Image (cartoon, rainbow, N blue to C red):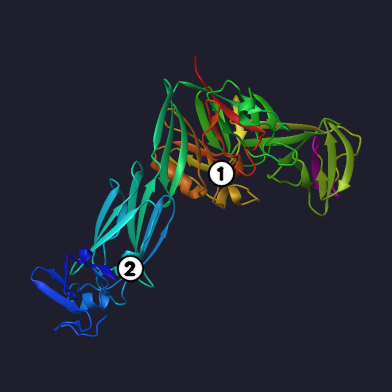
Amino acid sequence: MLPASRLGLSVTQENGATTFRKDGLSFTYVEGLGWIPPLEAGLPPPQGAMLPVEVVRAVGLVAAPEAGVRSSASANRLRLVFDLPEGDVVQPTPSSLAPYPGRLELSLPYFAPGLEAVRAAGVEVTARYELQSTQLVLQAPPGRFYRYRTFLLSNPSRYVLDVYYLEPEREEALMPGFRYREVWAWTPEPVRMYWLEALPGRWRMEPVGRPGERKVLPEMAPGALAILNGGYFDGRTGTPIGLWVRGGVPLSLPFGRSALFWQEDSLFAGRPRFAASVQLMDGRNLRVGLNLARARYTVHTLPGLVGRAGEGVHVVQGEQIIATYPAPYELPEGFWALTFPVEEPIARTGETLRLLVSLEPPANHALEAGPLLLQGGANVFDPNAEPFRDRAPVEAVAAQSVVAWSQEGALYFIVTEPMRPEALARVLQEQGLWGAIRMDGGGSAQLWVQGRLRNPVNGLLGVRPLVNGLALYPKP
């Protein structure tokens, strides 16, 4: 049943007869008799000012092919799916993402009576049915950020309309040279992004935290203007996973993934080059692999299972081998290990073994994280380029945390709602950024500005304590 007004009809009721009129067209229904010729009397009757679709077609008020309508709605989006008639040659023109001022009017080359059943909280949906089209009007809630898009699907043929009415973007000036922003990115679904921007020459960044100790980020740097979560760590022991250099002093050794390096206001991100060796009691140096960069002899600096079948494991505390075991072996916290072919031992329990690591590029501060997203303005994200046994950081839909910078030296702390890293790299490149690296994500992704957490986190568990972070201060 369609309202007569949506078809441009006027309605009069007199002496049991209901007459519908439009532009010289007139047709009448009489109680007890049915429709008056030329309509067939037995067509379904009207209900007040509502007309059955069969009568609408019989009278010739519509001639467009009919499309079925399905809908789904959320707090910030209405999706309408039009199931197009099979073999239909009338194809609506798809549109890329476009703004609208809260009221959206579209002309569809179809008869779509199913629009009468569409209900979306806060959105008014009205349609006017004309001979060759349906004029659709959507009025979204006031005070929102508005975008819409349309696209076609095949097999079966469908026309999809997505109408978004999102929380407004916002911007806050914090102090000269610093601003906070909340913006929408499109992946193609909308994703809220939380940005802290520091202009070139105005910022100073420091790594904060302590290996093996977990704290809520603001407790690590109470006087910081902003603080972003840092790199990965072992959840059981709080041991940082990967390179961590503060003030030129290594607090943790490389694991084998990309790291952020900085000196003053000069930033770089990439895979660190390092050489590792062990010095034996007789003074000889033996080149070794380090963590994920395995070799015939490999040093392991993180707690957990180390070594492979057929290898031996020297367990070292400080510079002394305190035990030797067959691999694999569960390395406890506070120790490091050297794995070696069992037929080629190079030392014995009780002897000294000194670990030497040289690192390039040299930097005052460094923090390993990854994967690398942008380098030199190019999208360099490659899910297989870096060693991640847990694929979540390179594949999963999760909250993302990023340090990014412009070619001129502006610095950005960014946290996002759940999205994929590959989409994040694309969005950041579209924003014109020069470099970007992903920090730890998921429940660890946190951006604190002026002591307040700006991005939503998992409220079931509260704010996750972390091992390290990046604190941002204004330069004097």
Image height of 137 relative to 24, above or below: above
Circle 2 SS class: helix
Decide if residue 390 is on the left or right side of residue 40: right
Amino acid on which the number 2 mark rests in the picture: Gly
Residue closer to the observer: 429 or 322: 429
x and y, in percent, of residue 237 in the image:
75, 38
Q: Which residue is drawn at 74% across and 35% down?
A: 277
Residue 459, placed above or below residue 450: below
Tell me which corner region of the image, top left, top right, bottom left or bottom right, holds residue 469: top right
Q: Which of marks 2 and 1 is in front?
A: 2
Residue 362 seen anywhere in this rendered image of the structure: no
Residue 398 seen anywhere in this rendered image of the structure? yes
State yes or no: residue 343 in magenta.
yes
Q: Which disc number belongs to residue 185?
A: none
Q: What stretch is highlighted in magenta?
A: 333-344
Q: Estimate the x, y position of residue 215 in percent, counting from the top left.
A: 67, 31
Along the viewing direction, whichever of 143 and 192 lies nearer the viewer: 143
Q: In which quarter of the image is residue 261?
A: top right
Q: Residue at x 32, y 58 (%)?
A: 150
Residue at 9% from the left image edge and 68% from the top image edge: 23
- Whether residue 414 is in magenta: the answer is no
Specify the quadrant that holds the N terminus. Answer: bottom left
Which residue matches tag 2? 114
Task: Determine whether, in the image, residue 52 is placed left or right of residue 80.
Answer: left
Q: In this view, does 385 lie to the left or right of 341?
A: left
Task: Point out which mark residue 371 bears.
Answer: 1
Q: What residue type is labelled 1?
A: Pro
- In this view, the residue farthest toward the top is 476
Can you give x and y, in whole percent of width and height, for residue 388 in the image?
63, 49
Is 210 located above or below residue 300 in the figure? above
